C-alpha cells in the first residue's frame, strides 16, 4: 500500500491526535489504552494487521482498481489456497507475516508488563475462524500460532475482531490446533481456551450486498469455530439458534450476553 505514512497521519489528524503522540512515529497504528486502576484495570490493545502484512499465498486481487467482482475473486483465491493446503506444501506460504517484528516486540511488552485484570486484544480481521473464504489470521498460520503463544496465560483475555459483515463468538478450542510445533499447549493458561467476539459494523450485513445469497451456505459450511453451535450441541435445553436471516447478520447485545451467561454456568 503506497503512502502509508501520509495515510497514518491523515487518520490521526482526523481523530485529533496531538502532534507528539507516539503513534505518529510508528510504522503502524497499533496502540493501547487502559481504564481504571489495579486490581480493576482493563487494557485494550489495538493491533495493526495491515501495515506489515505480507501478501497472501495467492496474492489477492480484491483491491485491484477497475476489476469487476474483485472481492469475489479474492474470496475464491483464499478458498483455493486452503483447499489445496498450500500452507502445508509451501513454506513460503506458511511463513508469511501478519505483523512486523517491531509490532511483535511491542505486543509482547504490552502483555508481559501489564497490571490489568482484563485484556481486550483488537484485531481488524478474525483470529480463530475456520472459514477460509474471509481474510483472517488463518491464512498466516505461523503468525496465528505465534499470536496465541504470546497471549497464552494473559489474564482476563478476550479477542475482538470485525471485517466479516456478521457477528459470532469463536473459541480457540474448536477447529484449530491448540498446540505449537514444539508441543506446548495453547490456551491452558486461559482456563482451557481463548474466546473471540466478532462484531462487524452495525451498518453492514453479509446477506446484502456483500455475500448476498451465498451468505448462509458459506457460514453454514464452516461452523466448527462457533461457540453457539457447541452450546446447542452440548445442552438440549439451550436453544440459541436464531432465525436464518438474523443468525447470519448482526447478533444483538442481548443474544451475546445470553451466550456468555450460558458459558459461565
Image: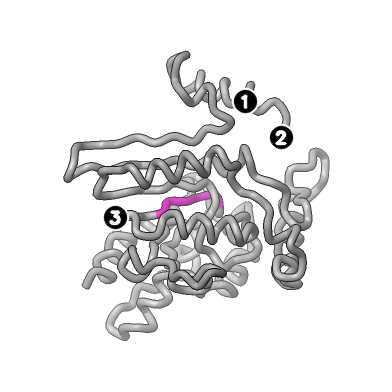
Q: Which residues are magenta?
A: 159-163
What secondary structure prevails in the magenta region? strand
Residue underneath mark 2: 1
Relative to 40, is 185 above or below? below
How many numbered callouts?
3
Identify which residue is drawn at 50% across, 73% down: 183
Give the position of the N terminus as an image quadrant.
top right
Whether residue 123 is in magenta: the answer is no
Helix, strand or loop under label 1:
helix
Q: Are marks 3 and 1 in contact (CB under 8 Å)?
A: no
**Tag nearer the camera, 3 or 2:** 3
Residue underneath mark 1: 7
Identify which residue is drawn at 39% across, 62% down: 195
Q: Residues within 10 Å of mark 3 (few under 14, many from 20)?
A: some
Image quadrant in which you'd find residue 9: top right
Identify which residue is drawn at 62% across, 37% down: 51
Sequence-wise, which precedes: disc 2 or disc 1? Answer: 2
Q: What is the x, y in percent for residue 22?
A: 46, 23
Q: For the view shown, which residue lies furthest in the bottom direction?
A: 236
Q: What is the x, y in percent for residue 13?
A: 51, 18
Whether residue 162 is in magenta: the answer is yes
15 and 19: which is toward the camera = 19
Sequence-wise, which precedes: disc 3 or disc 2? Answer: 2
Residue underneath mark 3: 156
Amino acid at each position: 500500500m503506497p503512502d502509508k505514512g501520509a495515510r497514518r497521519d491523515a487518520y490521526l489528524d482526523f481523530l485529533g491526535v496531538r502532534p507528539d503522540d507516539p503513534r505518529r512515529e510508528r510504522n503502524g497504528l497499533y496502540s493501547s489504552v487502559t481504564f481504571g486502576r489495579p486490581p480493576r484495570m482493563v487494557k485494550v490493545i489495538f493491533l495493526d494487521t495491515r501495515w506489515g502484512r505480507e501478501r497472501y499465498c495467492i496474492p489477492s486481487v480484491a483491491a485491484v482498481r477497475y476489476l469487476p467482482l474483485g472481492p469475489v475473486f479474492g474470496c475464491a483465491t483464499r478458498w483455493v489456497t486452503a483447499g489445496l493446503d498450500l500452507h502445508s506444501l509451501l513454506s513460503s506460504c506458511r511463513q508469511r507475516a501478519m505483523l512486523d517484528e517491531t509490532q511483535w516486540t511491542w505486543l509482547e511488552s504490552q502483555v508481559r508488563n501489564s497490571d490489568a485484570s482484563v485484556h481486550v486484544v483488537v484485531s481488524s480481521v478474525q483470529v480463530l475462524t475456520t472459514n477460509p473464504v474471509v481474510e483472517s489470521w488463518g491464512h498466516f498460520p505461523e503468525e496465528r500460532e505465534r499470536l496465541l503463544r504470546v497471549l497464552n496465560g494473559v489474564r482476563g483475555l478476550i479477542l475482538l475482531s470485525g471485517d466479516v459483515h456478521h457477528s459470532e463468538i469463536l473459541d480457540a478450542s474448536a477447529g484449530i490446533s491448540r498446540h505449537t510445533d514444539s508441543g506446548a499447549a495453547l490456551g491452558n493458561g486461559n482456563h482451557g481456551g481463548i474466546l473471540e467476539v466478532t462484531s462487524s459494523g452495525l451498518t453492514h450485513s453479509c446477506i446484502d450486498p456483500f455475500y448476498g445469497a451465498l451468505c448462509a451456505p458459506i457460514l453454514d459450511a464452516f461452523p466448527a469455530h462457533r461457540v453457539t453451535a457447541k452450546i446447542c450441541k452440548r445442552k438440549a435445553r439451550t436453544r440459541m439458534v436464531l432465525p436464518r436471516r438474523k443468525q447470519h447478520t448482526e447478533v444483538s447485545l442481548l443474544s451475546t450476553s445470553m451466550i456468555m451467561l450460558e458459558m459461565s454456568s
